[in-house]
Every structure is written in structure tokens, then in C-alpha cells.
Amino acid sequence: MTGFNWIEDLSPSASEALREKSRIRSLPGGITLYRQRDPMTEVFQIVSGAVRQCILTADGQEVLIYIYRPGDVIGDSAVASNESYSINFITRGKSVLRVWGARDFNDLRARYHDIEAAIVAQTNRRLKGALQIIEELLTLPVAARIASRFVSLAQMQKSEKVAVSLSLSQSDIGLMVGSARPNVNRAIRELRELGLIETDYGRILVKNREGLVRYIHDHGRQTKNNIDDE
């Protein structure tokens, strides 16, 4: 599975049934697909473009959770549970989406066991990812949180290449780890000087995932020691 595209792993019959029930929708950037606490009435798969998953705080600050890419499926967990969603989904640039209404989607879940099994697996995966983010915010310094996001995003691409390219601006990174731009700049510079990443405009090249993991482990241990000494 690449990213959050569980459809590519379905049986041919289930995949075809999903395609037949879908429709295509083209949207410009900045369109909100769902706001926090909206009922989920549609499920989306990104054909092209990207979608930001974020939370807006009471004072209007954005916390960026994830940027979904082509192939990723959005809204499947909430529609399956018949609940409103606690996250905002906003298109990032012009995007083309494959769309299913909630009724059609739930009918397909009932007919095809592999669709239901895939949604359960994805729900568990998203929960695990959310818990990891909470743990990092509580236990890791900014640079280690950034390194951890790079490792997680690179792993999601399931690429066999040694170096993995991520489409992320420094603004995106700051919103993901809850830190101001100057702190992000310092952390990026340190990781680059260590030879763990390279940077280009709007892109991060992850060169050494094992080195990033060691960096996270070492800095997490230092943080724990500092807390124990207080």
C-alpha cells in the first residue's frame, strides 16, 4: 500500500465496483471539503493535486496533520462509523477527486468484505499515527519532531529509492510540529549539515532514514535525561 491508498490492494471485482459508483470532481485550491464537526456525506480519492488535513484552534491557528497525495482516500473512516469528522480537509492547489456518496460507499462496504477490512486497517493506522504525533509533541524537541515527520512521510511512500523526495515547505513543517519558522529553519539547517537531508524550494530530500532514526532516538533520550535531572 502506498500512502493511504488501500483501493490499489483490493480484489479486481471490488475495485471495479468502486470505480463504477464514483464520479469525478475538479476543484481549485483552498476549497474546504469538510469543516470540523461537519457530518461526513462523501468519500474522496485524490486523482491529482493534494488535500490538507488540519485542525483550526479557537484563536484561528492551524495545526497541520497531514497532506494527502494522489491515490490517498479521505473520509472513509468517518463515513464507516457514521460520525462527524473532527478535522478540516482543504484542497491544496487545483485538485481532481474521485467521489462516492455515503450511501453508495456503505453499500459497497456491505457487499465486499475486503473493502470493510481495508477501512478497519486504515482506521487503526490513522489512530496509531495520531498517537505518535501526541507522543512526539510531549517528549521530543523541535528538531527531533521534524526528523520523525520526515521518517514517517518517507516510509509512507514505500519507495525503494535510498533518497525520498517530500513536497513540503518550511511553513508546512512548522504547522506540522507546532513550531515557529526560526526554530524550523535552525532544525532544517542542522539536519542538512549532518547529511541527513537536502533541501530545495518547497521540497525535502530525505537522504538517510537510518541516520534520522538515530537522531530521533538520541535527542529523545537527552530530553528524558533532562527531565529526570530536574
Image (cartoon, helix red, strand yellow):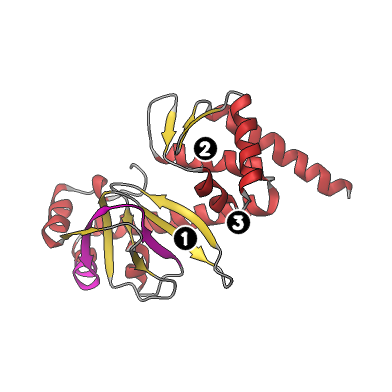
Q: Which mark is residue 220?
A: none
Could you tell me residue 166's position as x and y percent? 43, 37
Frontmost of labels 1 and 2 is 1
Badge 1 marks a residue whose secondary structure is strand
Question: Crowdedness of circle 3 by 10 Å Cα count: few (<14), some, many (20+)?
Answer: few
Which of the 4 quarters of the picture holds residue 112?
bottom left
Q: Is residue 90 magenta?
A: yes
Tell me the distance, in whole angstroms, between the alpha carbons under discs 3 and 2.
16 Å
Which residue in the structure is indicated by mark 2?
151
Could you tell me residue 159's position as x and y percent? 37, 31
N-term-proximal mark, 3 vs 2: 3
Q: Is residue 196 above or below residue 144?
A: above
N-term-proximal mark, 1 vs 2: 1
Q: Is residue 222 above or below residue 94?
A: above
Q: Nearer the viewer, residue 132 or 86?
A: 86
Amino acid on which the number 1 mark rests in the picture = Cys
Which residue in the structure is indicated by mark 1?
54
Residue at coordinates 38% horizontally, 27% vertically from top-left?
160
Question: Crowdedness of circle 2 by 10 Å Cα count: few (<14), some, many (20+)?
Answer: many
Amino acid on which the number 2 mark rests in the picture = Val
**149 sits to left or right of 161:** right
Amino acid on which the number 3 mark rests in the picture = Ile
Question: Crowdedness of circle 1 by 10 Å Cα count: few (<14), some, many (20+)?
Answer: many
Which residue in the structure is indicated by mark 3?
134
Task: Check the image and name the residue furthest to the left.
Answer: 20
Give the residues drawn in magenta, as a range: 87-107
Task: Check the image and name the residue furthest to the right.
Answer: 230
Badge 2 marks a residue whose secondary structure is helix
